[in-house]
Amino acid sequence: MNSDNIMLKIKGLKVSVDDREILTGVNLEVRPGEVHAIMGPNGSGKSTLSAVLAGKENYKVTEGEILYEGEDLLKLSPEERSWAGIFLGFQYPIEIPGVTNVNFIKTAVNEHRKRKGLPELSAAQFLKLMRERMAYVEMDSSFTSRGVNVGFSGGEKKLNEIFHMAMLEPKLAILDETDSGLDVDALRIVAGGINRLKTPQNATIVITHYQRLLDYIVPDYIHVIYKGRIIKSAGRELALEIEEKGYDWLINRQ
């Protein structure tokens, strides 16, 4: 890997929740164009890492640093992180009654454009972009007039989230157990949308418990997290070893 041009650098990160240490010293570097998968048993700290990157409350960083494009990420609010190009896909996307999908995403897109010094999209421009990006996830046009995630199935919520990601075009997408609760068809569509959004300029961190997602989204690097730290990093072949042997063979080496 090229040592320059690091988009995200996590160094010696320790994080506590309610005085209990969850992350015990995470180190990770992500460069533009890369896809990183973070795997590990339940309770290993995977979702805590994504929550800290997104700026969620109740997570106390006790040691270490996170640099995003050379800046201290921990000083930025969740909104500022979003404006800076970070997108977090939730394991359980929230419902927003009373706000239609189209109004929600139009407001978000134009706010991001404003922060970049760009003019708002006209109605025609927005509609064209929306139709194009809905096709990425094979989404029916009726979804746009519905409340955000209201009455959506688990699979529909995940599709909607990848649609939002496609509209916002983040530099760094962090997808926390996006495959959770998806059947094979929904998984294929979600993964297809993620793959279509990959460019040499952006990066993706996929957090997953299962190898099956990685049949569709091929990572450049896989990291196994256990007891709050990364215990193994390797190429995509590591996922196949985990599928075959589970995590015990790695954990027992510790």
Image (cartoon, grey):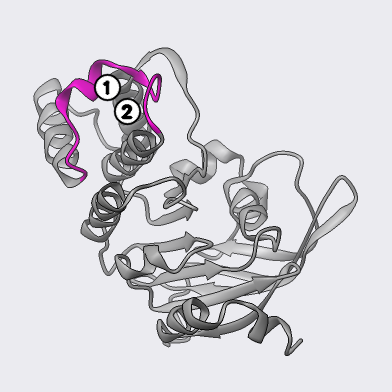
Q: What residue did someone put label 1 on? A: 102
The local crowd at label 1, few if under 14, some if 14 to 19, many if 20 or more residues have their Cα within 10 Å, is some
Q: Is residue 66 above or below residue 146?
A: below
Split into 4 quadrants, where in the image is the C terminus? bottom right
146 is higher (above) or lower (below) than 112:
above
User: What is the CA distance from the residue labelled 2 to the residue labelled 1?
Assistant: 5 Å
Q: Position of residue 52 (x, y in %)?
A: 65, 51
The kind of residue on which mark 2 rests is Ile
Q: At x 41% / y 36%, what residue is drawn?
A: 154
- Residue 113 placement, left or right of 84: left
Answer left or right for 140 relative to 185.
Answer: left
Quarter that holds the N terminus:
bottom left
x then y, percent, for residue 252: 74, 86
Image point 52% across, 45% down: which residue?
81
Q: What residue does disc 2 label?
A: 105
Residue 143 lies in the magenta stretch: yes
Range drawn in magenta: 137-153
